Amino acid sequence: MDTHGRDSAGMELKHLRCLVAIVDTGSFTDAALELGVSQAAVSRNLLALEKILGVRLLHRTSRTIEPTTAGVRALARARLLLAGAEELVSEAAFGHGRLHIGHAWSAFGRHTTEFQRRWHHDHPGIELRLVRHNSSTGGLAEGRCDLAVIRAPLDLKPWAHAVVGHEHRYVALASDDPWARRRSVRLDEVATRTLALDRRTGTTTLALWQGAERPAVEYIHDIDDWLAAIASGRCVGVTPRATAAQYRRDGITYRPLRDAEPVPVHLIWRRQAPHPATHAAVALAVDLYGGNRRARTDEQR
């Protein structure tokens, strides 16, 4: 029940289709022809919708049909709902014709463009979409994608997964920082600075520093906050090479970090009913990251 006491549970897509068809065709007769129903059915559906909404939706004269103010609003919402319903049907029927790969920050880093080009060439029947989603699973747990690129520490037990490559770590600095003039930075030196950290999707944790001295921390919420904190000069960042490739910004310089283990790059996906193109995506990513080296999946271990 909504705030006005009207029950929307009885609303059906046929009611919305009739409203849209009446307005688009300009008459009940033509709307009936377009929908393949009787004119009486069109009238009943419109009256039912007006009763559910509690407002009049159309001004009707002998010559014209125009939406009321409330009708204009209802018409816009009806078009969105019908489009969403059509997309849902299309996804259910032809979902395997589209592959969504999620990521929190950097997709495939410097390999992203080549991945897209080669996928388009090798799999023209499967549309590729890269989806940025700021969650620990890159949108996989939220149902936003079929596979996800993961670099941050994550419990992989719930997911099927493969290591597709490794990326060296870089230090992100304000471009006027003295370290920006150097060729590289040591891990122990970073411990003397304030580090920008994303606890949810970032790849860096304080466990990277094994000694007693660890950097001070400023926690941020996403990549945009991270970049802003570093550009201001109050923080530095530690990140995989992918970030340096994907997020080149005025005022920010990236330098290689010495003495730090590289970051593993995983593709993860659901164990049950994976997308048929999953292994093709894994194979392409492995090829781009490491040539002929094979991905080690949890199914092979």
Image: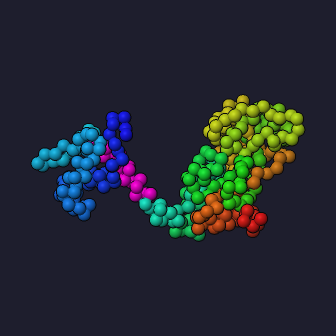
Whole-percent x and y of residue 48?
25, 48
Q: Is residue 76 magenta?
A: yes
Whole-percent x and y of residue 258?
84, 46
Q: Is residue 122 magenta?
A: no
Whole-percent x and y of residue 59?
18, 43
Q: Quadrant of the C terminus?
A: bottom right
Would residue 76 be found to the left or right of residue 299 on screen? left
Q: In this view of the protein, can residue 118 be seen by the observer?
A: no
Magenta-colored span: 71-88
Would residue 236 be found to the left or right of residue 114 on screen? right
Residue at 67% over, 42% down: 200
The quadrant in which residue 180 appears is top right
Q: Quadrant of the N terminus?
A: top left
Would residue 66 be found to the left or right of residue 148 on screen? left
Q: Main secondary structure of the magenta part?
A: helix
Residue at 72% over, 36% down: 196
Q: Nearer the viewer, residue 219 or 58?
A: 58
* Residue 187 versus residue 167 in the image, above or below: above
Residue at 75% over, 54% down: 264
Q: In this view of the protein, can residue 87 be seen by the observer?
A: yes
The quadrant in which residue 293 appears is bottom right
Render colour scheme: rainbow
Would residue 29 be found to the left or right of residue 264 on screen? left
* Residue 200 versus residue 167 in the image, above or below: above
The quadrant in which residue 85 appears is bottom left
Whole-percent x and y of residue 229?
67, 33
